[in-house]
Image (cartoon, helix red, strand yellow):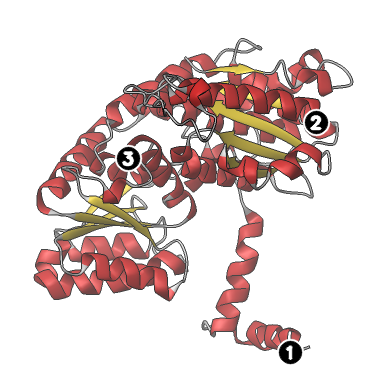
Amino acid sequence: MLTVDISKAAPFLSAPCEDALRPALAQAAKWLQNGGGKGDDFLGWVKLPEAYDRDEFARIEKAAAKIKGDSKALVVIGIGGSYLGARGVVECLCSPNYNLRKKDTPNVYFIGNGLSSAALREVYELVEDVDFSVNVISKSGTTTEPAVAFRFFKALLEKKYGKAGAAKRIYATTDRARGALKGLADAEGYETFVVPDDVGGRYSVLTAVGLLPIAVAGVDIRALMEGAADMMKLCREDGYSNPAWQYAAMRNALYREGKKTELLACFEPSFRFMAEWWKQLYGESEGKEQKGIFPASVDFTADLHSMGQYIQQGERMLMETVVRFEPDDNQMLVPHDDADGDGLNFLAGKTLHEINTQAMDGTLLAHVEGGVPNMIVRAGKRDARTLGELIYFFEYACGLSGYVLGVNPFDQPGVEAYKKNMFALLGKPGYEAMGDELRAKLAK
C-alpha cells in the first residue's frame, strides 16, 4: 500500500504542523465525505471506486474488446481532464513508446488537445489507411479544440466506412442527457458513455472518460479500480495514519513557510504524463483567489542535467515530491567491459534499479541540504493496482489541500477568460463588440 515519508520535509517548518492543521483537515475530510463545503456538487469521485456503474463498466469492457477486434488504432479526442489521465496511465503502464511496440492491441493516438495543424495532420495521416475508431470525450460537445478535431476524424470515418459504418466506430463519452455531443450521438447512433454530472474533468480518469482508452491499450481496468478502492478505504480515516492527510498537511505547511512551487519528480520516464495529469489536478483545483502552490514537474535523472542547477541553488521557494516505484521485473545488469575506458566497471553486475536507487538517494540528500524539502510517495510495483491507488491518493489529497487553503477545489472560473477572448477574436456570433475591443488592444 502507498505510503508518504515527510521526514525530509518536516525540518523545514518553524513549528510542527500536525496539531495546528488537524482541525482544518478534519473539517476538509468531513466536507469531502458528507458535503457542505464549496463545490460539494462535484464530489462524485470520492466514493466512485465502490459506487461506479457496474453495467456501464461492463459496456466499457465490451466496447474495448470490439475496438481491439476491428481497429488498428483508436483516436482519443479530448482536452485537459478528458485526456491527461488516460494518457498518463497508458504511458506509465504500457510505455511512452506504446504505439511503436509490437503488441496485440491498437495504437492509441491522443488529439483534440490543441489547435496545431501539424499535430492534427500527423495523426490524420497515421490512421487514414488503417481501420480505426474514435472516442470523442466532451461533456458539452462544444469545447473548441476537441470539437474541431472531431469534425476532421468524423469526416474521415464517414469517407472510409459510410455514415452507418462510421457510427459503429464512434464512441462518445459525454453528458448523460443533454449537450451538443449527446444530441449528435443519439441522432447518429453512436454508443455513448457518461461523464457524470458530479465528477469534474480533472477528477474523471476513473470514469468512462479514462477507462475506455485505458482498456483499449490492454490495461486491467478492474485492477485499477480495485487499487483505487483500497486507497479510498484508507483515505476515509481521520488522522495522520492517512497518507493523504500527511501530504496535504505538509504541502500546506511548507506553502505557509514560503515554499510556493512544488516539483513532482519521478525517476521513471514513463511517469511523465502522470505528472502532467497531476499538474492539472492541483493547478486547476488550487490556483484561485491569488492563492495556490504552483505545480511543476521534472523527469529524473534527465532533468538533473538541465534543471538540477536551479533546484540546487536557485531561489528557495521550492518543495519537491518524489514518486518511487518498486523495481520492475526483468532488471537489466550493467555489463563488464575489459577495457573499462569509461571507468564504470565498479557498476558491472549491478541492476539498473540498484543504480537508480542510489541516484534517488543521492539527489534527495543533495536537494535537502540545498534547502529543498522533500516528500517521498512510496508506491508499489508499476502496475494497474498501484496506479489506481496513486490516482485516488492524489485526488483525495487535492480535495483536502484545497479546502485547507480556503478555495473551492472543484471549480475553474479562470479558465473561461481565454475562451471568451478566443471566441471574440474568431468572430463567434454574439461576441462582435468584445472582438472589436480586443483587436483595438492588440493594435496598441
Depth check, front residue: 128 or 236: 128
Residue 58 vertical position relative to residue 246 in the rendered view, above or below = below
**Residue kind at label 1, given as amino acid type:** Ala
- CA gap between label 1 and label 2 equals 46 Å
Q: Quadrant of residue 208?
A: top left
* 38 relative to 159 in the view: left or right: right
Q: Sequence-wise, which precedes: disc 1 or disc 2?
A: 2
Q: Position of residue 325 (x, y in %)?
A: 47, 24
Disc tally is 3
Residue situated in front as seen by the camera: 215 or 415? 215
Q: Is residue 308 left or right of residue 121?
A: right
The answer, for residue 91, to whether it is visible in the render is yes
Bin the neighbour count of mark 1 within 10 Å (Cα to Cα): few under 14, some 14-19, many 20 and up: few
Label placed on residue 443: 1
Q: Secondary structure at mark 2?
A: loop
Of all residues shown, which one is farthest toward the front?
339
State the SS at label 3. Answer: helix
Disc 1 is placed on an element classified as helix
Q: Residues within 10 Å of mark 3 (few under 14, many from 20)?
A: many
Q: Position of residue 214 (x, y in %)?
A: 31, 41
Lateral position of residue 32 relative to residue 204, left or right = right
Please tell me which residue is depicted at 16% across the width and 40% down the height of the picture: 62
For image coordinates 66% across by 24% down, the residue present is 362
Q: Earlier in the sequence, mark 2 or mark 3?
A: 3
Residue 211: give its label: 3
Residue at image location 40% in from the left, 21% down from the top: 381
Q: Residue type at mark 3: give it.
A: Leu
Point 31% across, 24% down: residue: 223
